[in-house]
Image (cartoon, coloured by chain):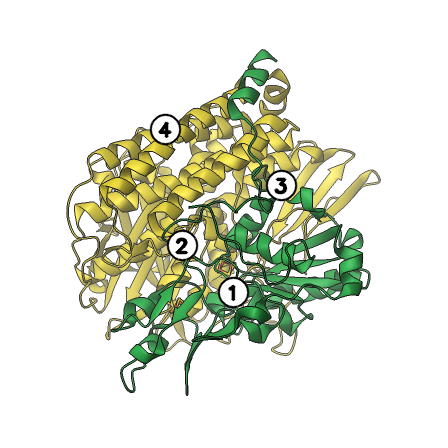
Amino acid sequence: MSFDSPNLATLINGRDILLDSIPMLSLDVLADTMVAAVAAGQRVASMFAVSTEDAQQAAEMYVILADDHQSRLFGARARIEGGEFASLTPRCPQVQLFEREMAEQFGLKPLGHPWFKPVRYRRSWTGRDAWDRPADQAILPGVGDFYSIQGDEVHEVAVGPVHAGVIEPGHFRFQCHGEQVFHLEIALGYQHRGVEEALIGGPTKRSMHYAETLAGDTTIAHGTSYCQVLEALGGCQKSARAQSLRGIALELERLANHVGDLGALANDVGFLPTSSYCGRIRGDFLNMTALLCGSRFGRGMIRPGGVGFDVDDARLTELLHRLDTAEKETASAVNLLWDTPSVMARFEATGPLPRQVAIELGIVGPAARASGLARDARHDLPSGIFHFAHLPVSTFDAGDVFARAYVRWLEIQQSIEFIREQCRAMPSGAAQVAVGELAPNSLAIAINEGWRGEVCHVAITDGNARFARYKVVDPSFHNWSALAYVLRNQQISDFPLCNKSFNLSYCGHDL
Amino acid sequence: MLKIFVARTQQGHRTMKYPDAPPPAMPDRFRGRPAISAQKCPDGCQDCAQACPTGAIALTDKVRIDMGKCLFCADCVNACPERAITYTGDYQLAARKRQSLVIEQGQNEADLWAALDARLKKLFGRSLKLRQVSAGGCNACEADVNVLGTIGWDLGRFGIQMVASPRHADGLLITGPVTQNMELALKKTYDAVAAPKIVIAVGACAIAGGPYIDHAEVRNGAEAIVPVDLYVPGCPPHPLTILDGLLRLIGRIEDGTRQTPQS
Ligand code: SF4
Ligand code: SF4
């Protein structure tokens, strides 16, 4: 199904557009257009507010819609006067967190929002508070209303922010009846360190480092998105070589994390062989990234205009050699999972995410693909090397923990093949070129398929070509709602397993 | 079952021999301890300090680099017209004193090398239980702390273990710049650890704020909230840097010994 509307500007991934070419709609028309677009199969990739000159009186709302099947992106905007707008969440649930974020950052009230809570527990950027809290009242993370169920036999379990393992902080509230979970609500914001706000006025010498640390395990996907935004605004043409090297780094990032996740899933069902092997092999993939750039997480690899490190033949040969070994060892470790009945019994039918729910919540990445949605930015909205190298989209339809694990295994095999092809046919060209002057009064968008799913960066420049707004959407921002959903009617003891099957980022959400 | 045995044989024994044998080879592009050749600096040049994203370089009478603030990004190296700064492969960066992380040309390296005092060493030298607190940051530091638990590193063989509760812990291992939203949780976790206790700050964030230094939302590192006994620089530190710091802290590596990785 295709949806075209004169209300929407067509955007191109990795390109910029003058702000004036983006239609300014009324809030009502924007809302109706979004509902129609989503009904026709599009999804909301990003939605955010931008300050206007009279920030106390008005703000602008921007919406980015993605049509995965038609490989198209659209943008529109509307002016919000007087600090409030009608919430679209009742008609389009996938915007629920975006609206709460706009409220928290800009003090804009989404009237009629069904669950109107803070996102990161902080003061607004504008001094206006959407919850009318007094200025001298401390805002404490995780403090406020939680969905609760009353009854003699119902109890509540609260976990976090400090958890038992070496993981990031978050607060989880389970409403349970015995072992059975009726509802899970997740409160985040503990990792909030103010990055989006700090990006305003940039680019500065810190911007690249902010991008690399938005979510440390997604350094390459976020770093690439940031650089593509700059390159779009600067009209910069990177070499094919730089694009290929970026692609290799992106797939190595996917490999390390997917292999690590399969090991962690094995650990959560007490199957130690795969857990130990994958834990170690994950390190081998991280070390391959370090072979390229000296950092296991790819710090320094992606730089505006290309890559920070070139490779010679000897390095590529070494990479291919290590890849061969890791491929064999990964297969031996991972295939044990599917052959072990005690593992399969725990994976199958645990934490199912129905396809329709995944659509309504706007889920991305392996989690969406495991629920039968063919959504993969490398395929649908390709940028860089993925214009030329076509990866098949791996899907599965069960939507359970097994499906999320198995999709990762399919992707591991494809990523290895992709890297091999790139290494064998590495194009020539400069590792890095100059970016050029950035365009003023423009919007640039970059979308990449990180290992968790779609990473979306949007920059809006002011008249001096500085960032008037820089909007980051980590895939976790979309997908936390899926984790909360799949816990319904599960055993609370399956929470770690369900959680690992998504393995979402707290810092990528909290920014 | 047979397949499990076959896989077991294929995967082999993987725990490294270090510290009884040389540590594993570091990547050739690894950026460890910086080396400064200030005699190359042109008069009045400020290029490195201006390029540094975190203000880690001070140019007064000497060139000083604060490894506690440093992201090991090499922006300064690329900005320097004379290549007066280089990043060496030296991974042994951890220090007991904050001031020891500020390095200058020809500096005596000895003060990087102190273990815990005799009393604490006696208590923790053979068994150190740590509660990890992630307090902001990007989660890469946590990831490379976690790696020490994998079979290749096997932290447990040194009697060091990450435990689930501060009540079971001898100290905290803190990552992240300490966001405002984690300040209270960190304080409570610290208070819940029985004395005597130690604190280890891992990564640029936990030492000085990292890339987020001076943001209103962060407290520029663990030290603003709790006393720190060991600083492990890096963004993130290599697992070997963290392990080296821990082993020296508990006296498992002799003070003053340098260890060269396999080549
Ligand atoms: S390597 Fe360290 S000192 Fe040099 S620019 Fe980066 S953060 Fe600053
Ligand atoms: S020090 Fe660097 S790697 Fe560690 S949490 Fe901070 S930003 Fe991430």
Ligand 2 is within 8 Å of the C-beta of the residue at disc 4:
no
Residues flagged by tags 1 and 2 on a common chain? yes
Residue type for callout 2: Phe
* Chain letter, green in picture: B
Q: Earlier in the sequence, mark 1 or mark 3?
A: 3
In three-dimensional space, the C-alpha distance between marks 1 and 3, rounded to whole angstroms, equals 24 Å
Residue type for callout 4: Asp
The residue pinned by badge 3 equals: B154
Q: How crowded is mark 2: few (under 14 residues within 10 Å), some or many (20 or more)?
A: many
- Residue A259 pos. (x, y %): 48, 34
The residue pinned by badge 1 equals: B204
- Residue A38 pos. (x, y %): 37, 41
Q: How crowded is mark 3: few (under 14 residues within 10 Å), some or many (20 or more)?
A: some
Q: Which residue sits at x=56%, y=59%?
A: A191
The residue pinned by badge 4 equals: A324
Residue type for callout 1: Ala
Looking at the image, which is closer to me, B194 or A509?
A: B194
Q: Which residue sits at x=50%, y=63%?
A: A103
- Name which quarter of the figure residue B245 lies in: bottom right
The quadrant the N terminus of chain A occupies is top left
Looking at the image, which is closer to me, B201 or A362?
A: B201
